């Protein structure tokens, strides 16, 4: 951790919240099946980067500094998440000593099939009264619903990692066997689905339909991004050829609140396309895929945090853009690290992208200089010598350096977004977090 000693170290600033986050997630994912419990909790046991919850918690803290008078939306509604979840109808659960958790099963929990023994385990609850809990949350500026949002974002992310490691044939994550290896593909997939289900329950309980729409869209975006990566249409000139830049067409949602994003590509015959146009289209495709698979969850979580804070439209949009720029930077750096470091340092496979047939930014920059890479990209580096040739081309074309510059651009855009927030310790921590995304080594 490059900034561990700093006063504004992102993790230290919300370390208490992060401990509560871990406990709360544990209580949200309990099932009646012990093996399922082992698989769903597996990735939460090893230290992850927790970038998404850090963004949500720090952003929420920073947004609390905006005076009430500058918010046009109602900040706290009476139908609070805690009324709906831990606290509703179960005040006894807070007099822990000698309390039988089964005394306070709510009919709702039974209805949802949630094992009451696990969910109501008093040890997984913050040891505070409702009043103390509220006071503490209001004091640090983070609302209970925003905490829950952070938990939901991490659960969705973890679900996608379980699936991703199956898709990518990965054998390690977070320095140990990946879920597919430790348990099996089938169990990893099912555990991911289970986490998504539980994240959806929590999302529904936020009782904010705009946030439900946003976070559900993020889930759909993850899949769409992964699909774009699976079937790289722009690289297969004889099948589908992309003519425009995949411009986003916004279709208003029925509620008129959250626009549905439709990305339109049209077909053009290969002969009409110049090399430059082809590379440009491939970059647009790559960036759009990157938005969907990584930046969408970060940007929509950030947008949701601002909505829950009752911010005005301008600030909501600004937070969205912050998450978007940070997310793009994050994944571009991820794609760069795939070329520059070792599996040991990453805690997961390195050099995997070319092996998987994926043309990320470094190789696209190389292709720009060397049109002869085109066929190789088209056949997904499937000939025995392709991977080595592509690596050599990336080196010669300074593909990694150019990729770093691209990430720097998104990083500086994200910093600009942050500067529109009121000055605060939390904002400083977010700046550090943003810069450390660029300099991270794993
Ligand atoms: C990691 O990317 C993976 C993602 C950012 C998203 C994966 C999404 C899916 C598998 C779609 C299914 C979605 C849900 C919600 C269950 P990477 O493979 O480039 O990074 P890595 O090096 O960490 O594996
Ligand atoms: Mg992967
Ligand atoms: Mg992947």
Image (spheres, rainbow, N blue to C red):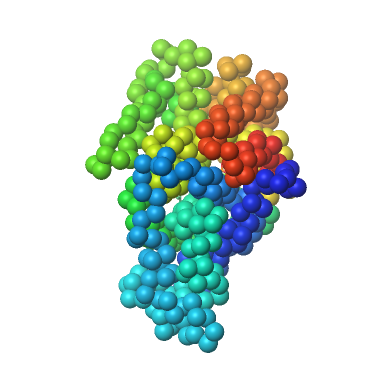
Query: Could you tell me which residue is drawn at 33 percent across and 76 percent down?
Result: 107
- Residue furthest to the left in view is 254
Near-viewer residue (95 or 113): 95
The image quadrant where one finds the C terminus is top right
Taking 361 as reference, is 257 above or below it?
A: below
Query: Could you tell me which residue is drawn at 55 percent across and 75 percent down?
Result: 123
Residue 164 seen = no
Taking 30 as reference, is 193 above or below it?
A: above
Q: Whole-percent x and y of residue 114?
A: 40, 72
Q: Whole-percent x and y of residue 311?
A: 41, 42
Near-viewer residue (233 or 12): 12
Near-viewer residue (72 or 396): 72
Residue 266 seen = yes
Near-viewer residue (237 or 201): 201
- Residue 398: image quadrant is top right
255 relative to 10 in the view: left or right: left
Q: Whole-percent x and y of residue 389?
A: 67, 26
Q: Whole-percent x and y of residue 233?
A: 43, 30
- Residue furthest to the right in view is 5
263 relative to 13 in the view: left or right: left
């Amino acid at each position: 951790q490059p900034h561990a000693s700093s006063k504004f170290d992102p993790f230290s600033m919300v370390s208490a919240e992060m401990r509560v986050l871990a406990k709360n997630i544990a209580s949200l994912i309990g099932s009646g099946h012990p093996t399922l419990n082992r698989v769903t909790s597996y990735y939460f046991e090893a230290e992850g980067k927790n970038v998404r919850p850090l963004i949500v918690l720090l952003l929420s803290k920073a947004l609390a500094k905006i005076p009430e008078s500058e918010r046009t939306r109602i900040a706290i509604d009476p139908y609070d998440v805690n009324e709906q979840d831990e606290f509703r109808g179960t005040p006894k659960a807070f007099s822990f000593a000698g309390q039988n958790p089964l005394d306070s099963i709510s009919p709702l929990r039974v209805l949802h099939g949630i094992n009451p023994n696990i969910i109501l385990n008093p040890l997984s609850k913050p040891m505070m009264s409702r009043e103390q809990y509220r006071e503490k949350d209001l004091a640090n500026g983070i609302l209970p619903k925003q905490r829950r949002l952070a938990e939901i974002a991490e659960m969705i992310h973890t679900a996608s990692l379980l699936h991703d490691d199956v898709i990518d044939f990965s054998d390690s994550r977070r320095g140990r066997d990946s879920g597919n290896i430790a348990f099996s593909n089938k169990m990893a997939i099912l555990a991911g689905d289970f986490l998504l289900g539980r994240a959806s329950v929590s999302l529904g309980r936020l009782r904010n339909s705009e946030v439900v729409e946003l976070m559900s869209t993020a889930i759909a975006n993850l899949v769409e991004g992964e699909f774009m990566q699976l079937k790289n249409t722009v690289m297969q000139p004889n099948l589908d050829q992309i003519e425009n830049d995949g411009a986003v067409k916004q279709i208003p949602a029925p509620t008129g609140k959250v626009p549905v994003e439709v990305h339109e590509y049209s077909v053009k015959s290969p002969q009409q396309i110049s090399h430059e146009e082809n590379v440009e289209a491939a970059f647009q495709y790559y960036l759009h895929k990157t938005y969907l698979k990584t930046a969408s969850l970060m940007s929509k979580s950030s947008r949701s945090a601002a909505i829950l804070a009752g911010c005005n439209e301008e600030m909501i949009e600004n937070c969205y853009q912050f998450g978007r720029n940070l997310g793009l930077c994050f994944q571009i750096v991820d794609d760069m690290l795939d070329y520059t470091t070792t599996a040991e340092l990453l805690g997961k496979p390195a050099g995997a992208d070319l092996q998987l047939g994926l043309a990320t930014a470094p190789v696209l920059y190389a292709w720009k200089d060397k049109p002869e890479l085109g066929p190789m990209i088209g056949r997904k580096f499937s000939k025995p010598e392709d991977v080595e040739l592509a690596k050599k081309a990336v080196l010669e074309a300074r593909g990694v350096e150019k990729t770093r510059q691209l990430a720097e651009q998104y990083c500086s855009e994200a910093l600009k977004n942050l500067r529109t927030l009121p000055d605060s310790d939390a904002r400083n921590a977010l700046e550090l977090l943003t810069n450390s995304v660029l300099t991270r080594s794993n």
